[in-house]
Amino acid sequence: MFDAIIILVRALSHPSAIKVSDIVKRAPVTVTPLTTVEEAVKLMYREGVGSVIVVSPEGRVLGIFTERDLVKLIGEGKPLTSKIGDLMTKDPVTVFEDDTLTKAVTLMAERRIRHLPVVDRDGKLKGVISARDIASTFGKYLEELGEISE
């Protein structure tokens, strides 16, 4: 709760002060380009996420595979044994962990994407933020604001 209050104070005093790293809550779920779609989808289900990030052995982002990609794959009749590297969105839009949340939200809205990989200044994957993460974060801020004003 203390973290939420600190972020809330930042949001109220200056909305652009919230950093992407403030809302990254878990380690990213990753696969390699050789992972099959079936393996990736099972991993997504097990981890409760809507995307997996495809990474190089060095941890650099090569692509992303999302629920939308799965719908497209099934719609086109491609087999679940296909390799993620052949079907992923290559070179996805990313943000730096020290970028503002405002920048991330703007990118997501402009590009009509729901999952955004977060990288450090060396290009290594640090996390993923989703539209759901952002909505949840602001929902918590509003709850905290209600508790503070009471």
Image (cartoon, rainbow, N blue to C red):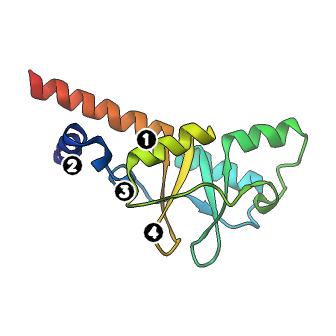
**In contact (CB < 8 Å): disc 3 and disc 4:** no
Rounded to the nearest angstrom, the CA distance separating label 2 from label 3 is: 12 Å
Q: Of the residues under marks 2 and 3, which one precedes in the sequence?
A: 2
Circle 1: residue type: Asp
Rounded to the nearest angstrom, the CA distance separating label 2 from label 1 is: 15 Å
Q: How many residues crowd mark 1 within 10 Å: few (<14), some (14–19), many (20+)?
A: some
According to the image, label 1 marks what residue?
Answer: 133
Asked if residue 51 lies left or right of residue 120, the reply is right
For the point 40% across and 56% down, which residue is it?
Answer: 99
Percent position (x, y) of residue 79?
88, 48
The mark closer to the camera, 3 or 1, is: 3
The mark closer to the camera, 4 or 1, is: 4
Q: Of the residues under marks 2 and 1, which one precedes in the sequence?
A: 2
Q: Name the secondary structure under disc 1.
A: helix
Q: Name the secondary structure under disc 4.
A: loop
Rounded to the nearest angstrom, the CA distance separating label 4 from label 1 is: 19 Å
Q: Name the secondary structure under disc 2.
A: helix
Circle 3: residue type: Ser
Percent position (x, y) of residue 126?
46, 64
For the point 70% across and 39% down, which residue is it?
Answer: 68
Which residue is outermost to the bottom? Answer: 58
In the rendered structure, find residue 3 and report the number of the disc placed on it: 2
Q: How many residues crowd mark 4 within 10 Å: few (<14), some (14–19), many (20+)?
A: some
Viewer can see residue 55: yes
Rounded to the nearest angstrom, the CA distance separating label 3 from label 4 is: 10 Å
According to the image, label 3 marks what residue?
Answer: 21
According to the image, label 4 marks what residue?
Answer: 120
Picture quarter with the N terminus: top left
Q: How many residues crowd mark 2 within 10 Å: few (<14), some (14–19), many (20+)?
A: few
119 versus 20 height, above or below: below
Q: Of the residues under marks 4 and 1, which one precedes in the sequence?
A: 4
Rounded to the nearest angstrom, the CA distance separating label 3 from label 1 is: 12 Å
